[in-house]
Amino acid sequence: MVYGKLAITALMIATATSALAQSRDQIRIVGSSTVFPYTQAVAEQFANATGAPSPIVESTGTGGGMQIFCAGIGEQHPDLTGASRAMKPSEYELCKDNGVDDVSEALIGYDGLSLAISRANDNDWDLTSAEVYLALAAAVPVDGEWSANPYTKWNQINSDLPAVDILAYGPPPTSGTRDAFVELAMHAGCEELDFVKDGGFDGDWVEENCSRMRTDGPFVEAGENDNLIVQRLNADANAVGIFGYSFLYENLDTLKAVKVGGVEPSETTIGDFSYPVSRPLYFYTKNAHRGVIPNFNEFIEEYMSEDALAPGGYLSERGLVPLSEEKRAELQKTVLDGEPMSAPE
């Protein structure tokens, strides 16, 4: 009886994926706005090299992409999602609950969460993590009390900083870039504050009290389109933008980096993690769609190619910091073999 139910389930999956292959001839990809330009570059290279229809790549944000990706298998569901952080346990469970129980994880390289400003701004910007926190957090120490953020100008935080209004454009809560920025910049900056160090507060306190971005104007959620942030920085020479390194790298003619702790983001400083706001980038493949969606396996092979991933490859030319040769070989084997990921902790 159990065998019969399993056979029926397998038949339903096979029927669903077969129908998917017959009715959809384009690979569909969702996910991180940071991973988007890399995946789009692979899609263009793949289409040019093979003559196959170019994959549809949508910038939905990491969280939004996970929700769409994990909703099920079949023609209405995407084949791959990009992520600027690792899949969360709750997302893994959502996938499993919806029958998406065979997923491969690919850590494709590294990225720096860049703070950038217009080249029209004459100041040499160098901020500590604590100053970033004090400028953008919802709550900060004021006269020995944990209070709503009162700072409106940079020189109120540090008199050596410019006497201009604090205005930063950054990612929304659905973005993996936002998650990473909170963890790597905001929490780190909060932990540098004397109020926190002298108060003996632990990591749980920091996570609970130092994770909220301010909503009173100086921090503006700019959506999932990082190119829009670039446009706003070019329109306002005093505005700061927060986005992945690739967007700074591709716009160095009009933008310049804001150093963090004296370190400027670059391939070297991101790769050795001396730039303090560095992180890994991922994509996740739906293995039930392999061999069913036309050209999906071939697209994955292009993404895993040395032409794409190696130092000097076309993704590093767009700002992706490559993995070491050893880690890259391990990644390629894992993804090309379709090895299923383990449950995240």
Image (spheres, rainbow, N blue to C red):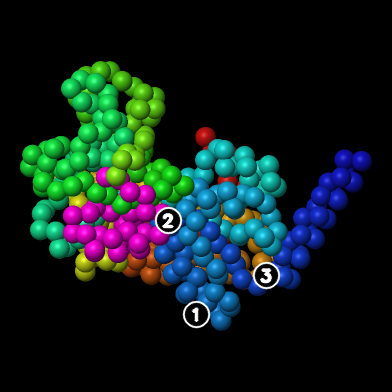
Dot placed on the residue nearer the N-terminal end, 1 or 2: 1
Whether residues under marks 1 and 2 lie with C-beta atoms below 8 angstroms apart, the answer is no
In this rendering, which labeled residue sits more in front, label 1 or label 3? 3
Nearest-to-viewer mark from 2 and 3: 2
Q: Residue furthest right?
A: 1
Image x and y of residue 277, in percent? 30, 45
Amino acid beneath label 2: Glu
Q: CA distance from mark 2 to mark 3?
A: 26 Å
Label 1 Cα neighbours within 10 Å, binned few <14 / some 14-19 / many ≥20: few
Tag 2 residue: 224
The answer to which quarter of the image holds residue 118 is: bottom left
Q: Position of residue 156 (x, y in %)?
A: 13, 37
In the rendered structure, which segment of residues is drawn in magenta?
218-247
The residue tagged 3 is 24
Q: Is residue 269 magenta?
A: no
Q: Residues within 10 Å of mark 3 (few under 14, many from 20)?
A: some
Distance of label 1 from label 2 (alpha carbons) = 27 Å
Which tag, 2 or 3, sits closer to the chain's start? 3
The residue at the point 52 percent across, 35 percent down is 345
Name the residue beneath numbered marker 1. Answer: 48
